[in-house]
Image (cartoon, grey):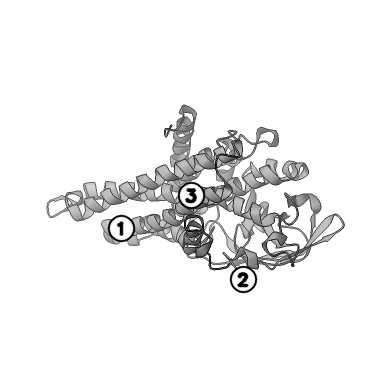
């Protein structure tokens, strides 16, 4: 078994880390200020080095390393989160990468040619719109309707807690892969996934003010008789529930990687501080109450990092070797990562803040922004903490543990 990154992957990581330290770190505080946005110039530079093309094949303008997309994706998001600990920039990128993969796999040729070349520029935001006011993790309770009318799918409904609404509608261009109910009588077998460009007639949005990740908007979307071309449907009609779960598997791997990257940087900040902070005539690192906490947190993060890398490799291998593992087995592994990474990240950042003391409670220190950012993934974004437990229990214990059956 080979656990090392390849020479090409290590070179990619080194190149990206140098880019992030040079171009992103100086802007990180600006990105996370109230009502701020990610600068277009920065997105252009990220596109130039191929970040938004990681999941897009060359024929559509991307640079996808075929069969290694998720491993490269985790490397990219990890480095972005080290540089922008607020998570705004890594989330922007991971949504485009993860859900872009779904268009690559299940989009029509016409849709791929229309959307993917624009996604790789970084200026076309691609997101996911599943959550509704009446149901978040209860995907089977989605009420947004899609009705076939000739060569159109007419959409009516509302989505909430959706990333990138301002970016897609106003600041740039973009759209969201959306889950809609197309057969009301078929239960979870009556959903279809469709890509909805943001600026179609009848589509509107509002912005919700979040406590963190302020560089990337979050809000609601309303669809009133929005007509979507038939070629924007992903996969088959009424098979959207399964595509939705597959897309979340990819996105959650990248989310976990962002949490690991941010936490790694937080530990480094704390480590460097306690080595030079003198208390009672000696470095703070000499006190075991501090150094042992850092040692334990480093060990937990390293264990998570290795399991996450293995999970990303499994996701890539599944698409090359269909019999390797099942999607459900991959879901269990992904949920272990998604359940663990935000929780470990939030706990470690809080401890790092206690090591830095009062300085950590100022906006000069990035740890406060990091804590607010990672909490979004603990409380619900891309699947809440307890929902991951439910998935793990379902696959490990069996159907006897499932409350909705």
Along the line of sight, the residue nearer the viewer: 11 or 365: 11
| Position of residue 145 measured from the top left corner of the image (x, y, whole percent) | 74, 65
Q: Taking 207 as reference, is 156 left or right?
A: right
The residue that label 3 is drawn on is: 333
Taking the spot 28% from the left edge, 47% from the top edge, the residue there is: 271
Residue placed farthest to the left in the image?
Answer: 281
Residue placed farthest to the bottom in the image?
Answer: 134
Q: Is residue 119 above or below residue 142?
A: above
| Position of residue 222 measured from the top left corner of the image (x, y, whole percent) | 70, 67
**Would you say residue 354 is visible in this rendering?**
yes
**Would you say residue 90 is visible in this rendering?**
no
Q: Taking 229 as reference, is 299 left or right?
A: left
| Position of residue 183 measured from the top left corner of the image (x, y, whole percent) | 76, 63
Element assignment for label 3 = helix
Mark 3 against mark 2, which lies toward the viewer? 3
Q: Is residue 9 above or below residue 143?
A: above
């Amino acid at each position: 078994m080979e656990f090392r990154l390849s020479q090409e992957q290590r070179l990619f990581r080194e190149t990206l880390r140098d880019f992030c330290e040079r171009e992103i770190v100086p802007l990180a505080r600006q990105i996370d200020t109230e009502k701020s946005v990610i600068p277009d110039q920065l997105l252009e530079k990220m596109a130039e080095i191929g970040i938004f093309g990681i999941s897009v094949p060359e024929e559509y303008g991307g640079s996808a390393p075929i069969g290694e997309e998720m491993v490269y994706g985790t490397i990219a998001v990890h480095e972005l989160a080290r540089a922008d600990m607020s998570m705004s920039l890594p989330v922007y990128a991971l949504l485009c990468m993860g859900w872009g993969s779904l268009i690559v796999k299940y989009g029509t040729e016409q849709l791929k040619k229309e959307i993917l070349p624009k996604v790789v520029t970084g200026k076309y935001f691609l997101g996911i719109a599943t959550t509704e006011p009446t149901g978040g993790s209860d995907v089977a309770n989605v009420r947004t309707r899609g009705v076939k009318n000739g060569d159109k799918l007419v959409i009516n409904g509302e989505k909430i807690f959706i990333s990138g609404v301002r970016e897609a509608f106003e600041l740039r261009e973009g759209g969201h892969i959306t889950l809609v109910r197309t057969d009301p009588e078929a239960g979870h077998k009556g959903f279809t996934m469709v890509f909805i460009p943001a600026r179609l007639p009848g589509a509107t949005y509002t912005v919700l003010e979040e406590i963190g990740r302020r560089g990337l908007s979050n809000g609601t979307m309303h669809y009133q008789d929005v007509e979507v071309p038939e070629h924007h449907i992903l996969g088959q009609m009424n098979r959207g529930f399964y595509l939705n779960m597959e897309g979340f598997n990819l996105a959650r791997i990248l989310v976990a990687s962002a949490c690991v990257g941010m936490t790694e940087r937080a530990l480094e900040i704390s480590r460097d501080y306690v080595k030079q902070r003198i208390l009672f005539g000696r470095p703070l690192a000499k006190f075991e109450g501090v150094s042992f906490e850092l040692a334990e947190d480093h060990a937990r993060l390293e264990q998570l990092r290795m399991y996450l890398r293995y999970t990303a490799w499994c996701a890539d291998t599944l698409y090359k070797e269909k019999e390797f593992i099942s999607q459900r087995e991959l879901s269990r592994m992904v949920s272990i990562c998604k359940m663990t990474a935000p929780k470990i990240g939030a706990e470690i950042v809080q401890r790092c803040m206690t090591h830095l003391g009062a300085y950590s409670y100022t906006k000069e220190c990035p740890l406060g922004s990091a804590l607010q950012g990672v909490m979004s993934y603990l409380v619900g974004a891309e699947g809440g903490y307890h929902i991951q437990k439910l998935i793990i229990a379902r696959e490990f214990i069996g159907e006897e543990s499932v409350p909705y059956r």
